[in-house]
């Protein structure tokens, strides 16, 4: 799964490598070989197998797709998966952008320290982080204990098993990723661009809107697409924190593979998820370009 | 939006924009700028200790100084990017220290050009005009005009990364002046260009200045550039101005040994003061009369300084009015129109002699013995500290 449409910055890196290597495109193509081989064996081949399973039972058939799109349950869950992933990705980017901006505008000396702080959560596996939510927010968890001790509530509050907590947990997992990706993009924006805009007459807000924001757009797109695609695959978080009513497609795939043993159905679900994911990622990239463009100038 | 409202209205009136088009060249009068005892203190450094400089309307003043002497800091304080720790700064008699950069109506060319990479050349140049709510047709006309001025009329649709260094430089210049600021700041604008292009751009900048009439503060650590371009040069050292003057004043009448050594090259002969206002120079094996200006100074040691071109290679007899001495060529540097000789004096000191040449002039090889004449009137004397 993961990085399909997300390698937006790869092009630039590749070009700069070509400058370093001073070779033409053709003769340096061998550099791609190890990655291409790995992808072919571990990614393309399994995907092809999954595609095949989704269309063949005893013979070619569309019955699994019919089952998915004919069932209200699957349609609802598919829609919910998209909405959850989209909202989680957007929240991560919106919350992460100011943090990335803060990091990117620190003096070089202190930048690394701040970055370490942002990356700290990644040292703890997301499974453990998810369980910690369960403990923290459970009926008899410290959060409720504290609230009751303070007299703010006399009944334990139902934090778990709902949308809010799923979003919170997803964003918490995605945030370091979103911040680092956008931060990396912002590093290439020179401080003098903002100075130039200011001395030419732009207020700080105008300089941000017309210069900084458009130049950080590719970072936003990368972060949004990566967060979205990662969210599509979440299943521990919705399962543990959201409960069965907030199940996502991945939970359905999990069940089809591990419980009901309908592998063809699981494959079809996987294909649907992949295609929808690619489509939405494309739309997101386009939308960000539109939203952050400096507008037609001269006006 | 900054620059809107009253400020933009005032600007438009100042340039008579409501009367429609105006001819270039007579449109501007520059602003007077007065730095008084400006200080800037960082945690570890004093970037400017007491910077005072009065700049006339329309003047081209260059800040010249070694790295870290505070040139950029002075510009940044004038532009509003850096807050001064003390002192006052006036433009046309009004203090501007409280204004944010966008309200100062100052044009600036940055060292790295800082063209917005996501906008075309035309959009870059239009940026300050769009901010000032100039009408669309007027923007198009003035962007065209500005690009014509820098000879890039047909480049409007290009992106900055499709331009050469010199072209980017010119676009940055067009963008900085298109809104007709009365003050233009340039921080080492030619630093990244090769020598040929630098010289071409120096001519261009002089032409723009004559055409636009704005006050220019130019920063460089290239002394040749400073001498060629400026009405006046302020030589800086350690956050202070060592000397201000016209290029000729700075070069011919340096106030201090620091200025003499920083602008152009100079040979230094340490000397001892002797009774009767004379100076003994052991390296030359002679004593000479001290000029009155130095005679009163307290120091016992006085350095005599002579520029390489003021040391002449003379025949055995015709050294009248000069201090004469013998020397041996150690190395000859061929520079085309001149030859620069590194020579050793009899007493051992090594000095530089610059000799004008023509195609027929032979170059003396290392080891050649020659006689030098130092013109007394061109020597500078500085009390040693
Ligand atoms: N943001 C800052 N924080 C701390 N010290 C600074 C800062 N900016 C400049 N300085 C210090 O102030 C002094 C003057 O710096 P400035 O940039 O004005 O020098 P400059 O004359 O422009 O040099 P250069 O020719 O290298 O550009 C230097 O000693 C520098 O280290
Ligand atoms: Mg500088």
Image (tube, rainbow, N blue to C red):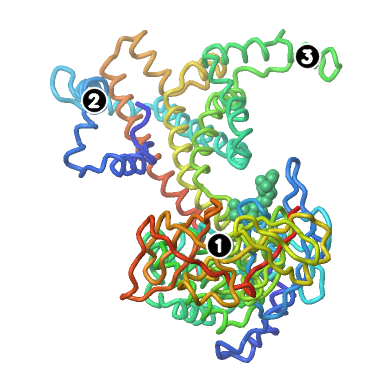
Q: Counting residues from the N terminus, which is met first, the one under dot 2 or under dot 3?
A: 2
Above or below A260: residue A53: below
Query: In the rendering, at what x and y percent does residue B236 appear?
Result: 68, 60
Q: Give the percent coordinates (x, y) of residue A42.
A: 26, 20
Residue B110: name its quadrant.
Answer: bottom right
Q: Position of residue B331 (x, y in %)?
A: 41, 55
Residues at marks 3 and 1, CA–CA distance in whole angstroms: 87 Å
Tag nearer the camera, 2 or 1: 1
Residue at 57 percent of width and 36 percent of height: A91
Describe the element under mark 2 as helix, strand or loop. helix
Q: Nearer the viewer, residue B233 or B259?
A: B259
Left or right of B255 in this view: A289: left
Quadrant containing the N terminus of chain A in the rendered view? top left
Q: Does residue B206 appear left or right of residue B152 in this picture?
A: right
* SS of the residue under disc 3: loop
Residue bearing the label numbered 2: A34
Q: Is residue B362 left or right of residue B98?
A: left
Disc marking residue A155:
3
A164 or A143, which lies in front? A143
Say which residue label 1 marks.
B265
Between the C-alphas of marks 2 and 1, the distance is: 59 Å
- The kind of secondary structure element at disc 1 is loop
The numbered mark 2 sits on a residue in which chain? Answer: A
Q: Residue A140 sits in which quadrant?
A: top right
Mark yes or no: residue A299 visible.
no
Q: Residue at x 61, y 23 (%)?
A: A165
**Mark 3 residue's CB less than 8 Å from ligand 1:** no
Contact check, label 3 and label 1, Cβ < 8 Å: no
Q: Residue furthest front?
A: B317
Reply above or below: B380 against A263: below
Gap in Å between the C-alphas at discs 2 and 3? 59 Å
């Amino acid at each position: 799964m993961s990085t399909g449409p997300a390698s937006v910055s790869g092009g630039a890196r590749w070009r700069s490598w070509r400058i370093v290597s001073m070779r033409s495109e053709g003769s340096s193509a061998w550099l791609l070989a190890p990655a291409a081989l790995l992808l072919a064996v571990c990614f393309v081949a399994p995907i092809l197998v999954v595609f095949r399973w989704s269309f063949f039972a005893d013979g070619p058939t569309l019955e699994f797709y019919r089952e998915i799109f004919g069932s209200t349950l699957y349609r609802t869950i598919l829609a919910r998966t998209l909405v959850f992933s989209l909202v989680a990705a957007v929240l991560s980017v919106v919350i992460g952008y100011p943090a990335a901006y803060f990091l990117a505008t620190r003096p070089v000396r202190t930048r690394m320290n701040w970055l370490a702080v942002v990356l700290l959560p990644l040292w703890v596996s997301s499974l453990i982080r998810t369980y910690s939510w369960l403990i923290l927010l459970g009926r008899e968890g410290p959060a409720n204990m504290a609230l009751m001790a303070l007299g703010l509530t006399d009944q334990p509050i139902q934090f778990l098993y709902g949308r809010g907590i799923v979003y919170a947990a997803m964003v918490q997992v995605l945030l370091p990723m979103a911040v680092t990706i956008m931060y990396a993009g912002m590093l290439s924006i020179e401080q003098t661009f903002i100075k130039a805009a200011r001395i030419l007459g732009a207020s700080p807000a105008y300089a941000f809107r017309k210069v900084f924001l458009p130049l950080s757009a590719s970072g936003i797109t990368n972060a949004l697409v990566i967060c979205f695609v990662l969210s599509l695959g979440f299943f521990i978080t919705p399962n543990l924190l959201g409960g069965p009513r907030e199940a996502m497609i991945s939970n359905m795939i999990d069940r089809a593979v591990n419980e009901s043993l309908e592998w063809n159905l699981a494959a079809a679900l996987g294909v649907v998820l992949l295609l929808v994911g690619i489509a939405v990622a494309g739309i997101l990239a386009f939308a960000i370009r539109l939203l952050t463009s400096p507008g037609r100038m001269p006006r | 939006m900054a620059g809107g409202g009253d400020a933009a209205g005032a600007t438009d009136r100042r340039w008579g924009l409501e009367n429609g088009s105006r001819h270039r060249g007579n449109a501007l009068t520059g602003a007077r700028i007065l730095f008084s005892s400006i200080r800037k203190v960082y945690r570890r450094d004093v970037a400017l200790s007491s910077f005072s400089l009065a700049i006339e309307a329309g003047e081209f003043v260059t800040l010249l100084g070694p790295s870290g002497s505070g040139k950029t800091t002075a510009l940044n304080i004038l532009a509003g990017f850096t807050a001064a720790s003390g002192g006052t700064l006036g433009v046309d008699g009004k203090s501007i220290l409280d204004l944010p950069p966008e309200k100062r109506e100052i044009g600036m060319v940055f060292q790295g050009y800082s063209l917005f990479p996501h906008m075309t050349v035309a959009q870059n140049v239009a940026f300050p005009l769009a901010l000032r709510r100039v009408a669309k047709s007027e923007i198009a006309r003035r962007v065209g005009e500005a690009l014509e001025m820098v000879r890039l009329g047909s480049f409007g649709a290009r992106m900055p990364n499709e331009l050469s260094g010199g072209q980017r430089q010119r676009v940055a210049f067009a963008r900085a002046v298109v809104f007709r600021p009365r003050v233009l700041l340039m921080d080492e604008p030619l630093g990244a260009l090769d020598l040929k292009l630098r010289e071409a751009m120096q001519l261009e900048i002089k032409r723009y200045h004559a055409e636009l009439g704005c006050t220019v503060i130019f920063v460089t650590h290239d002394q040749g550039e400073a001498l060629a371009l400026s009405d006046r040069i302020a030589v800086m050292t350690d956050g202070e101005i060592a000397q201000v003057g016209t290029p000729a004043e700075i070069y011919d009448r340096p106030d201090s040994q620091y200025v003499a050594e920083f602008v152009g090259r100079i040979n230094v002969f340490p000397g001892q003061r002797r009774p009767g206002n004379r100076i003994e120079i052991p390296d030359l094996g002679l004593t000479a009369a001290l000029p009155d200006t130095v005679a009163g100074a307290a120091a016992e040691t006085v350095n005599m300084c002579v520029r390489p071109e003021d040391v002449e290679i003379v025949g055995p007899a015709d050294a009248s009015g000069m201090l004469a001495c013998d020397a041996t060529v150690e190395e000859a540097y061929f520079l085309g129109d001149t030859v620069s000789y590194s020579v050793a004096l009899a007493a051992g000191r090594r000095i530089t002699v610059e000799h004008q040449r023509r195609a027929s002039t032979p170059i003396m090889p290392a080891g050649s013995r020659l006689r030098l004449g130092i013109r007394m009137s061109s020597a500078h004397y500085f009390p040693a500290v």
